[in-house]
Amino acid sequence: DPDFVKELGEPFEVYVNDAFGTAHRAHASTEGVTKVITGPSVCGFLMAKELEYLDGAVNSKSDKKLAAIVGGSKVSSKITVLNALVDKCDLVIIGGGMVFTFLKAQGHNVGTSLVEDDYVETAKEILEKVSKIEGKAILLPKDIIVADKFAKDATTETVSFDQIPDGWMGLDNGPITTEEQKEALSDGVGTIIMNGPMGVFEFPKFAKGTMDLINILADLTKEKGVTTVIGGGDSVAATEQSGRAGDMSHISTGGGASLELLEGKELPGVVALDDQ
């Protein structure tokens, strides 16, 4: 709305955008006002830090490995960022509900676990793509905590990834998986981006895979100086819940903005600012 843009911007001479969480939207207050303000349009300290860590992570020139942890319930909501991270990262760890679409793509029985059948072929293509590139790896769970129902009081078992019983659903990673993740992330990795939990961490029975991984990341930062970037609402919530948020390199304030930046997209609220 050009009239609203003028009403917002014309009384002012300088514009500072420090709302990274809205930078992926071309709104009057994030992009439009920069066209009518006569003075400089710049980012604030928070915005600068977000860009430094997120953009710096995926475009790093470091000799050390770049790793991404992509979790959450659905492949469909992360497919674009997953493809982008596969291209940029040496290691991609996949967790959460999206695991079972990948396991089904490999031909395994997944019981009543969450599966997006429309994305099974996509998952297969991603796995094949990575298998053909030397030095790249996708890490899927080796063992899974399964439940007889989606509830905090469900009966649980820990089974191999290829032994999920009929009528049971996977809701978290098992201990073998967590140990394998620790070994992979400790092997020459310089930067780790985490976006999405490993299980249904809101239920205590299915929180261990996520919380143990968060502890691994925090320890790598404290002990080895690994850069750890946590993005996405659920990842941030789990990290805060763990009490280790202060040990991470950076906790992102942007959900959609973080994802789009990791995907390699230009953010309208950033593009509109002056180059300084």
Image: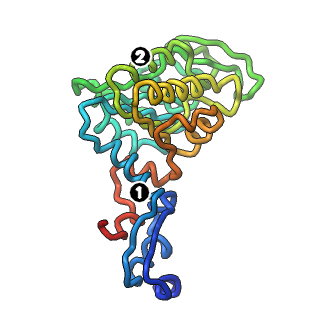
In this picture, residue 192 sits left or right of residue 219:
left
Is disc 2 surrounded by few (<14), some (14 to 19) or many (20+) residues within 10 Å? Answer: few
Per the image, label 1 sits on a secondary structure element best described as helix
Q: Is residue 121 visible?
A: no
Measuring 70% from the left and 29% from the top, which residue is drawn there?
A: 203
| Foreground of the two, 143 or 193 | 193
Instruction: Tell me if 173 is positioned left or right of 103 in this view.
Output: right
Residue 46, how many percent across, how many down? Answer: 48, 56
Quadrant of residue 69 within the rendered picture = top left
For the residue carrying disc 1, how many other residues have a C-alpha within 10 Å: few (<14), some (14-19), or many (20+)?
Answer: some
Horizontal and vertical percent for residue 256? 49, 53
- Compared with 187, 81 (above or below) is below
- The image's mark for residue 183 is 2
Query: Which residue sits furthest right?
Result: 153
Quarter residue 190 falls in = top left
Regarding mark 2 in the picture, which secondary structure is present there?
helix
Q: Earlier in the sequence, mark 1 or mark 2?
A: 1
Q: Disc 2 residue type?
A: Glu
- Quarter of the image with the C terminus in it: bottom left
Q: What is the x, y in percent for residue 252?
A: 50, 47
Q: Which residue is mark 1?
A: 48
